[in-house]
């Protein structure tokens, strides 16, 4: 399984970058976890848009789905030009029916509701979900490879939640939202501090951690050292285009 950081900012993208978006590839399968602002431009540095199978959305905040509309337009163009005949698959929760119903139209997209009880099978990947602690309904994702048994866990947006510990167990890579510094309190906004990320990573025995959903203040290397202080294994700050092979 190959994981590429397409975007990692919280809230809005800094110049020439993108908010939350990760490209997951295994075999011929290519899917995005979230599709934040700026993601479509960045994604084309890695693959052609027509190659993408689909997008799995964690929730309906703009910094996780702002580029979904234009990504859908790209599929309309590519199907019209006969570059592909495959609709773009969009996987999302349907707790917010208005948001869910506006995700796409038939012919060019295939919109599928996911839930906690039935994992999705996408190519050789098994994707399961767990609700997080966030102001609107949001799901963390676990992506397991049937080929290699490697496990990727993406917290999406969440305050620290003990229920995530068993969900994140066995993760070869834990993509953890790290929105605040150790001396702050992110819980009222539904986000984690660096200290809480260290707690989650340690308790779940994650093998490595990638810090994402990074803030627009302070110094990110401080976030990294704060996580490392409580968690002895490998910690990486997300950066545009960074690739991880699991
Ligand atoms: Zn959010």
Image: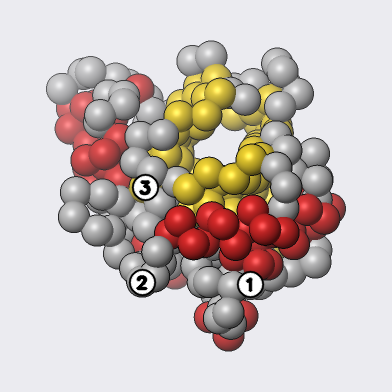
Q: Is residue 17 left or right of residue 180?
A: left
Question: Looking at the image, which is closer to me, 95 or 169?
Answer: 169
**Tag 3 secondary structure:** strand
Q: CA distance from mark 1 to mark 3?
A: 20 Å
Q: Is residue 46 left or right of residue 168?
A: left
- The residue carrying mark 3 is 7
Q: CA distance from mark 3 to mark 2?
A: 17 Å
Residue 141 x, y percent position in the rendering: 64, 48
Q: Earlier in the sequence, mark 2 or mark 1?
A: 1
Q: CA distance from mark 2 to mark 1?
A: 19 Å
In this rendering, is residue 137 above or below 229?
Answer: below
The reply to whether discs 2 and 1 touch (Cβ–Cβ < 8 Å) is no
The reply to whether residue 233 is visible in this rendering is: yes
Single out the mark in the foreground, 2 or 1: 2
- Give me the residue at 42% from left, 39% from top: 5
The reply to whether discs 1 and 3 touch (Cβ–Cβ < 8 Å) is no
Question: Looking at the image, which is closer to me, 141 or 110?
Answer: 141
Quarter of the figure with residue 46: top left
Figure quadrant of the N terminus: top right
Specify few, some or many for label 2: CA neighbours under 10 Å numbering under 14, 14-19, or 20 or more.
Answer: few
Label 2, ligand 1: CB separation under 8 Å: no
In this rendering, is residue 49 above or below 141?
Answer: above
- Give me the residue at 56% from left, 23% from top: 245
Mark number displayed over residue 198: none
Specify few, some or many for label 3: CA neighbours under 10 Å numbering under 14, 14-19, or 20 or more.
Answer: many
**Tag 2 secondary structure:** loop
Mark number displayed over residue 159: 1
Label 1, ligand 1: CB separation under 8 Å: no
- The residue carrying mark 2 is 217
Residue 24 x, y percent position in the rendering: 50, 31
């Amino acid at each position: 399984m190959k994981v590429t950081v397409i975007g990692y900012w919280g809230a809005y993208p800094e110049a020439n970058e993108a908010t939350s978006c990760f490209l997951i590839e295994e075999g011929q399968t290519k899917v995005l976890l979230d599709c934040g602002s700026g993601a479509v431009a960045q994604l084309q540095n890695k693959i052609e848009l027509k190659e993408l199978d689909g997008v799995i959305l964690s929730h309906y905040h703009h910094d996780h789905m702002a580029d979904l509309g234009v990504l859908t337009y790209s599929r309309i163009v590519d199907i019209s030009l006969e570059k592909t005949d495959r609709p773009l698959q969009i996987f999302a929760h349907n707790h917010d029916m208005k948001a869910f119903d506006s995700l796409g139209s038939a012919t060019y997209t295939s919109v599928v509701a996911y839930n906690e009880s039935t994992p999705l099978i996408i190519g050789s990947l098994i994707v399961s979900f767990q609700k997080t602690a966030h102001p609107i309904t949001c799901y963390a994702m676990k992506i397991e490879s049937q080929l290699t048994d490697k496990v990727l866990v993406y917290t999406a947006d969440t305050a620290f939640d003990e229920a995530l510990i068993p969900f994140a167990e066995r993760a070869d890579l834990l993509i953890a939202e790290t929105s605040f510094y150790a001396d702050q309190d992110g819980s009222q906004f539904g986000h984690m501090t660096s200290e809480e990320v260290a707690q989650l990573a340690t308790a779940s025995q994650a093998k490595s951690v990638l810090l994402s959903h990074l803030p627009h203040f302070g110094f990110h290397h401080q976030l990294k050292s704060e996580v490392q202080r409580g968690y002895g294994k490998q910690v990486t700050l997300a950066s545009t285009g960074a690739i991880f092979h699991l």
